[in-house]
Amino acid sequence: MLKYTNVLKHLAISICVTGMAWGSVAQGEDVVISVTDQVGDQLEGAVVYLERTDGQPIAWTKDDDVKIIDQKGEQFSPFVTALSVGDSLEFHNTDPITHHVYSFSKIKPINIIVPARQNSEAFKFDEQGVVAVGCNIHDHMAAFIYVAPSPVNGITNADGQVKFSNLPSGDYNLSYWHHRVPRSQTKNQKISVTGSTEIAVKISIRRDRKRSTRRRTDERPY
Ligand SMILES: [Cu+2]
């Protein structure tokens, strides 16, 4: 696979050199981030984002769609949402009952009743940070929104992986956030992307899984 990728890269370079029309086409790399916790378990639901070390914006295609958090079966879905600064999000309600979405977060206080089978207005997020969300009617409902300062952001899947495709080569700072990592411990780690790259990240999380979601959202002033 590596050899095949290298062949593709050589082809791409040849095309750039031989055809001016191709010169403006950005050739990027695939970067896979694998996140595990302190005992080596693959960690799902970690927000990972990359910023260029020189502070310049990243030329990267971004999904501009309004994101959605659904309320279904008295649960928020998804549990964790990653946004870029400036993105918008709607709360949908596919349940046959009313939900009352709230957040005491500093960056985006929310207080909106979403009647059965209706959608909220779009909320725009203009600051980086965490927004813990609950429902005033159903205490067991909880969700987290992480607003990242970079469009290159994503959430690890069940295998603990997030993939960024077609990323320009260069040096990046990798940062992460996870709801079981004590407050403010987003971490920076410098990575160099010079080809298709796999990065392993280990995160120490609180493994107290028996704590209720209500306690989890209340203890954080998000
Ligand atoms: Cu509710």
Image: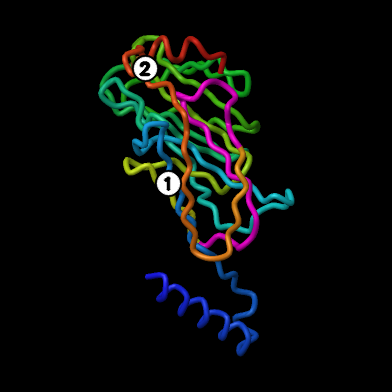
The answer to if 170 sits in the magenta stretch is yes
Query: Which label was assigned to residue 34?
Result: 1
Is residue 182 rendered to the left or right of residue 51?
A: left
221 falls in the magenta region: no
Magenta region:
166-187
- The answer to the question of whether label 1 and label 2 lie on touching residues, with beta carbons closer than 8 A, is no
Quarter the C terminus occupies: top right
The three-letter code of the residue at mark 2 reads Asp
Identify residue type, mark 1: Ser
**Residue at x 53% of width, y 79% of height:** 12
**Residue at the disc numbered 2:** 208
Quarter that holds the N terminus: bottom left
Q: CA distance from mark 1 to mark 2?
A: 22 Å
Image position, residue 168 (x, y; %) = 60, 62
Q: What x and y, as percent, mark residue 95?
A: 28, 24
Q: Quadrant of residue 127?
A: top right
**Residue 202's disc number:** none
Q: Nearer the viewer, residue 167 or 122?
A: 167
Mark 2 C-beta to ligand 1 under 8 Å: no
